[in-house]
Every structure is written in structure tokens, then in C-alpha cells.
Amino acid sequence: MQGKIEVTYTVICDKDTYKEITIKELVSNEKIVKLLKSEFARGLRNLETSDNGEGKIILQTEKALHTFVVEKQDFADLVELAEEDARLNKHLKKGCQAVEIIDFTTID
């Protein structure tokens, strides 16, 4: 196998956050409904909120993406090579001890 692979990864930290909130949960919260009405329906009365689908809002930690290039023959070691790249570039800090491979593409 000749050629190269471009690998994109992110660093996983202990305090990373991921939360999914459905629209149904949002419109059932009185504080959110009051805020929506004051922002988008100022001065209108007798309004009702409802959910007409399974829309979701995702709250998650913003992650920086890092890339590096390796030979195709190193495919089996991508995670180890990503960890090594993160250590060399000082992306791994206290509380951030792992990497997640996001994508990899072949380069001819």
C-alpha cells in the first residue's frame, strides 16, 4: 500500500459535556416559554406553545480538530499515532488524556 492518510482527531477531556434536549422539553419549561414569548411575540396575548416534531438541540463542548498525515501502511496504528501527535503538539493537558479519531481520508 502506497500513499498517505490524512487523519483528523480531537482530544477527549474529563469535563466534556454532551446533552440532548428535545423541543418538547423546551416548550414545557415555563422560563423558556416566557423568554420565547417576550423575544418573538412581544405585546401579543393568549399564546400557546406546542411541539410538532422530534427536533433536538444538542449542547456539547466545542472541540478543536487537529490533523496529521501518515503512510497508508500505518493504518492499524492510527489511534496510537494520533495520541503521539497530540503529545508532541502539547494538546494533551491535565484532564485530557485521550484522543478520538474523527475522520481519515486517503491522499494519493
Image (cartoon, helix red, strand yellow):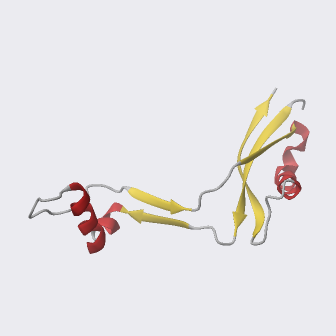
On the rendered structure, is 19 left or right of 36?
right
The vertical placement of 5 against 100, above or below, is above
Locate residue 48: give its quadrant.
Answer: bottom left
Question: In the rendered image, is residue 17 in sight?
Answer: yes
Image coords of residue 53 (percent x, y):
30, 55
Q: Position of residue 8 (x, y in %)?
A: 73, 45
User: In the picture provided, is 15 more to the left or to the right than 98?
Assistant: left
Q: Quadrant of residue 7?
A: top right
Of all residues, the one furthest to the top in this rendering is 108
Q: Residue at x 74, y 72 (%)?
A: 95
Query: In the picture, which quadrant includes the C terminus?
Result: top right
Q: Position of residue 75 (x, y in %)?
A: 85, 44
Q: Residue furthest left?
A: 46
The residue closer to the viewer here, 26 or 42, is 42
Instruction: Let me know if residue 29 appears in the view.
Output: no
Apparent side of residue 81 relative to residue 14 in the rendered image (left or right): right
**For residue 97, which quarter of the picture?**
bottom right
Residue 39 appears left or right of 92 = left
**Quadrant (top left, top right, bottom left, bottom right) of the N terminus:** top right
* Total numbered badges shown on the rendered structure: 0
Residue placed at 29% from the left, 72% from the top? Answer: 31
- Residue 89 picture location, percent across and down: 84, 53
